[in-house]
Amino acid sequence: MSYTVTFTFYPESKECLKNLSELSCNSNISSEFFYQLSQICHNIKLLDITIENYISDGLSDLILAQKNLKYYNMTQYDEDEKIPLLIESLPNTLIKLKLYGYNYISLSFISKFINLQELLISIYSGDICGFEELQNIIFPHLRILNFEFECPKYEEFIKFLENNGKNLKVLHVGDNHIEDIEGYNENLLNLAIVKLCPNLRNLSTGFGMI
């Protein structure tokens, strides 16, 4: 038997939830729970979602209700046809985007978040698909770029750095997976980073840290 909490029965909780600024939860929580939160919580700045089993209908409504969402983390354990709808609900006010787990979607959706300051892609299974569209997008505020595991194709990555490398302060590429980049060449990558990322303060690649 499942139970659904109705926040309207508890005026004190409603008043408290109005000021909720961070929420971490699984995607398969009751739709009614998300619907109720969407009526009360409009000031969430950090949303951390784990996609597991399925995505409840009310989750996208909760995202749409936010007035100033800045940080979005998403971990994908399971595939769901509603993931694109969830992504479409995200506002372009995001300044930090972190993606973890498996990859079930094209990363081309990132192109709309031109205010990003930090982008972390920690995909440990699946291709970095859709990066061919990102390579031509300029993110004028991007300062931190982190590929923890899987990496985009070499030519696409270099093109991305041509457009965005000059403002980067931190760059992390691939740990032990860097050699898996299609077209990868250690010397060429080093030279490209030196040329295209002149303001780096921290550089970490699969062959060491500078």
Image (cartoon, rainbow, N blue to C red):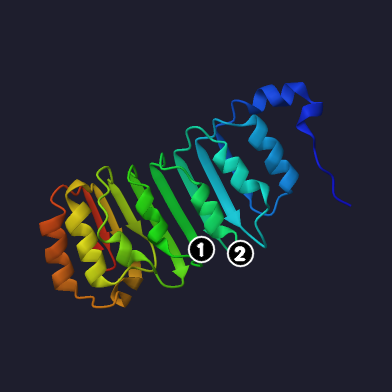
The residue under label 2 is 80
> Where is 205 relative to 17, above or below?
below
Quadrant of the rendered image containing residue 9: top right
Quadrant where the image shows the C terminus = bottom left
Whether pointer 2 and pointer 1 mark residues with C-beta atoms closer than 8 Å, the reply is no
> Which disc number belongs to residue 101?
1
Q: x and y percent of residue 59 in the render?
A: 63, 47
Q: Position of residue 73 (x, y in %)?
A: 49, 49
Q: Is residue 196 left or right of residue 204?
A: left
Q: Nearer the viewer, residue 68 or 145?
A: 68
The residue sitting at 30% across, 74% down in the picture is 181
Any part of residue 210 in sight: no
Circle 2 packing at 10 Å, graded few (<14), some (14-19), many (20+), is some
Badge 2 marks a residue whose secondary structure is loop
In the rendered view, tell whether residue 108 sits above or below residue 10.
Answer: below
Determine the residue located farthest toward the right in the rendered image. Answer: 1
Residue ID at (61%, 64%): 80
Nearest the camera: 69 or 186? 69
Provide the secondary structure element on which disc 1 rests.
strand
Numbered mark located on residue 151 in the image: none
Residue depicted at x 38% and y 41%? 95
Q: Residues within 10 Å of mark 1 (few under 14, many from 20)?
A: some
Kind of residue sitting beneath label 2: Asp
